């Protein structure tokens, strides 16, 4: 089992997992935000995954984007895999709306994170978990 990078573990909470990926949500009230982290040791870039893993990750990413947009009413879904701060491959799927805290600019490094309480989670998390039908880790 591949461990999460400490920064990902600190900034996100579990939504579920597949045999390929940890599915996490970013602990920031400002944005509905999912992070997909392949459970593959030493992988930093998408192209380093084998073809089957790339296709499975793409399918999961697309399903997360589709359902996140439907659940939140977002006008735009941002998808990215930067890895400049956290080298472990991880894909961001972020629901954006005109007028959100950083609109129309990027979310990374902007403003102050607004975390949820220890036992709180956004309403869309349970709904997304159900739509994806993955067990909670």
Image (spheres, rainbow, N blue to C red):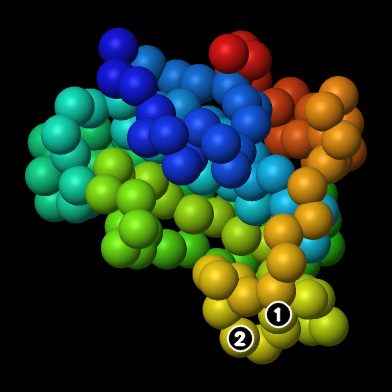
Asked whether residue 64 is in view, the answer is no
- Evaluate if marks 1 and 2 touch, with contact meaning CB atoms under 8 Å apart: yes
Q: Which residue is mark 1?
A: 102
Q: Residue at x 45, y 20 (%)?
A: 18
Determine the residue located farthest toward the bottom in the rendered image.
104
Instruction: Say what secondary structure mark 1 lies in.
Output: loop
Q: Which mark is residue 85?
A: none
Of the 4 image quadrants, the one containing the N terminus is top left
Eyeballing the image, is 50 above or below 18?
A: below
- The quarter of the picture where the C terminus appears is top right
Residue 90 on image: x %, y %: 37, 46
In-front residue for pair 26/46 = 26
Give me the C-alpha separation between circle 1 and circle 2: 5 Å
Residue placed at 30% from the left, 63% from the top? 84
Identify the residue at image location x=80%, y=76%: 100
Foreground: 33 or 131?
33
Q: Position of residue 45 (x, y in %)?
A: 19, 51
Q: Secondary structure at mark 2?
A: loop
Please give the name of the residue rendered at 79% of the width and 83% of the height, measured from the top-left corner: 98
The disc at residue 105 is 2
């Amino acid at each position: 089992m591949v461990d999460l990078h400490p920064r990902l573990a600190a900034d996100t909470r579990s939504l579920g997992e597949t045999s390929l990926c940890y599915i996490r949500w970013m602990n920031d009230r400002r944005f509905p935000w999912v992070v997909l982290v392949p459970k593959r040791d030493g992988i930093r870039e998408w192209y380093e995954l084998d073809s089957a893993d790339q296709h499975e990750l793409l399918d999961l990413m697309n399903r997360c984007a589709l359902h996140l947009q439907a659940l939140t009413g977002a006008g735009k879904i941002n998808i990215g895999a930067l890895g400049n701060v956290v080298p472990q491959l991880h894909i961001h799927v972020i629901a954006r709306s005109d007028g959100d805290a950083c609109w129309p600019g990027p979310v990374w490094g902007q403003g102050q994170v607004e975390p949820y309480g220890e036992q709180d989670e956004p309403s869309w998390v349970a709904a997304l978990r159900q739509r994806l039908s993955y067990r909670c880790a």
